[in-house]
Amino acid sequence: MSGDPSPSGTIERCRVQPDGFLSLSESTSWRLGAILFARRSNAFAVVRKAPVSGGGYEFAGLHALPGGMARAARSSNGGTGSPRDILKESLLDRVRREVGLTNEDLLDPVFASVGPIVSSYTAKGSQRFTLIVPFTSEVGSAASLQVSDRSVDEASWMPIPPAWEGLAPGNLVAIAHLVWNEMDEEQRAAARPLVDGSARRCSEWAGSIGVAPVPPPWASRDEITAWCTGWPL
């Protein structure tokens, strides 16, 4: 594969589209989003998605990592910054509003070592796709969580291993890849059906827009490598 087979390569090729979101082009079927695995000791920050007026939001009531769609916020001089800056600034703003964690609470957020994860939801009667870029960060021990964004109605610390059945699919897959090696065999056996189901669901979404499928964390090394190098160029 030519180019940079990483989230960084995809991010730098993105541009702000007329709808205000990041993607490779206006006609690209996905828009870029980011989530943060913010960890403190043996737990990580999660939010519970709030219901949407009129219903129809598939993930209402489910837990997810803080974050969301990357949307450009224009500066006073009319600029929007680089795609990487837009993605990270948008993520940190969402994290601050959704769980109350500030830049001072987070210890150098970095890209997670995973491949592309696609999520899908319905908005205004149309199916939308999000290409998720997971970040990870340690959190200072004194940090506390609080919600100031109406898109979520709860923020809490979730232990490792988490309550898999209450997680939104794309987030569940990301978390599974990040914590799988810390779990014992009994914990892995309990998690496998739900992780497998979410990986299959995300793979179906990915396949419909031409993105690499998502393997479960117990897949072969070759499958994991192909996924981690499968970011759109």
Image (cartoon, helix red, strand yellow):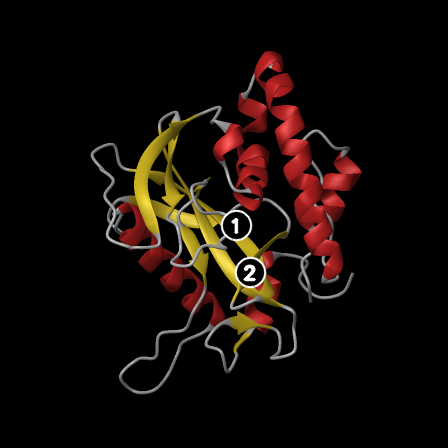
The one nearer the camera, 147 or 178, is 147
- Residue drawn at point x = 57 percent, y = 17 percent: 187
Identify whether 186 is placed above or below 224: above
Q: Which mark is residue 58?
A: 1
The structure residue drawn at horizontal position 35% and vertical position 27%, both measured from the top left corner, is: 41
Residue farthest to the front, as pictured? 54
In the rendered image, the vertical position of residue 158 relative to residue 131, given as above or below:
above
The quadrant holding residue 8 is bottom right
Q: Where is residue 35 drawn, in percent x and y? A: 46, 50
Residue at the farthest top position = 186
Q: Which mark is residue 122?
A: 2
Within 10 Å of the Cα at label 2, are there few (<14), some (14-19), or many (20+) other Cα atoms? few
At numbered mark 2, what does the secondary structure look like: helix, strand or loop? Answer: strand
Which residue does the image show at 37% across and 42% down from the upper left? 47
Q: Under tag 1, what secondary structure?
A: loop
Q: Determine which of the numbered discs, if any, sits on residue 24 in the image.
A: none
Coordinates of residue 63 in the picture (x, y in percent): 43, 39
Whichever of labels 2 and 1 marks the residue nearer the N terminus, that label is 1
Name the image quarter holding the N terminus.
bottom right
Label count reads: 2
Q: Locate the C terminus and report the quarter of the image it occupies.
A: bottom right
Location of residue 129 by image quarter: bottom right
Decide which of 153, 183 is in the foreground and name it: 153
Q: Position of residue 212 (x, y in %)?
A: 73, 53
- Quadrant position of residue 105: top left
x, y percent for residue 128: 59, 64
Q: Reply above or below: 163 against 139.
A: above
Circle 1 packing at 10 Å, graded few (<14), some (14-19), many (20+), is some
Amino acid type, residue under disc 2 in the picture = Thr
Amino acid bearing label 1: Glu
42 displayed left or right of 84: left
State if disc 1 and disc 2 touch (CB < 8 Å). Answer: yes
